[in-house]
């Protein structure tokens, strides 16, 4: 990883922590897959855009309805639990 890429990732992580009021280090708890039968959804202010069959890193199980995740482009957001499948 180059120095420029490393700094960009650190900046994105700081932005994530500020936006979602997340304290501590960012650790991946597990990986889950978006249900292949789910329809593609656009992201919102704090929601992550979803693609069927996409693998997401789970950062935090926030409540019974949502999970805080990171996608392959290092974007963070909430995802409904109803569309997530364990790997």
Image (cartoon, rainbow, N blue to C red):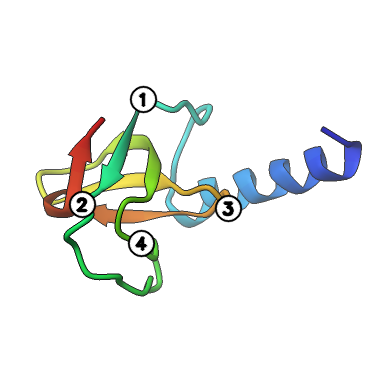
Q: Which residue is mark 4?
A: 51
* Residue 38 position (above or below residue 86): below
Circles 4, 2 touching at the beta carbon (< 8 Å): no
Q: Which residue is mark 1?
A: 29
Query: Which is closer to the viewer, label 3 or label 4?
Result: 4
Mark closer to the chain start, 1 or 4: 1
Q: Residue at x 40, y 72 (%)?
A: 45
**Distance (Cα) linking label 4 and label 2:** 9 Å
Q: Residue at x 35, y 64 (%)?
A: 47
- Residue 39 lies, in percent from the top left, at 22, 70
- Mark 1: few/some/many CA within 10 Å (<14, 14-19, 20+): few
- Mark 3: few/some/many CA within 10 Å (<14, 14-19, 20+): few
Mark closer to the chain start, 2 or 1: 1
Q: Secondary structure at mark 4?
A: loop
- Residue 44 lies, in percent from the top left, at 37, 73
Left or right of 48? Residue 82 is left
Q: Which mark is residue 73?
A: 3
Q: Quadrant for the N terminus, please.
A: top right
Mark closer to the chain start, 3 or 2: 2
**Distance (Cα) linking label 3 and label 2:** 19 Å
Q: Which residue is mark 2?
A: 35
**Distance (Cα) linking label 3 and label 4:** 13 Å
């Amino acid at each position: 990883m180059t120095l420029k890429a490393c700094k960009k990732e650190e900046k994105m992580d700081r932005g994530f922590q500020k936006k979602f009021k997340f304290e501590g280090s960012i650790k991946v708890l597990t990986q889950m897959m978006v249900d292949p039968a789910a329809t593609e959804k656009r992201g919102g202010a704090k929601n992550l855009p979803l693609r069927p069959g996409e693998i997401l890193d789970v950062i935090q199980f926030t409540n019974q309805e949502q999970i805080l995740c990171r996608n392959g482009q290092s974007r963070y957001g909430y995802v409904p639990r109803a569309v997530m499948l364990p790997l």
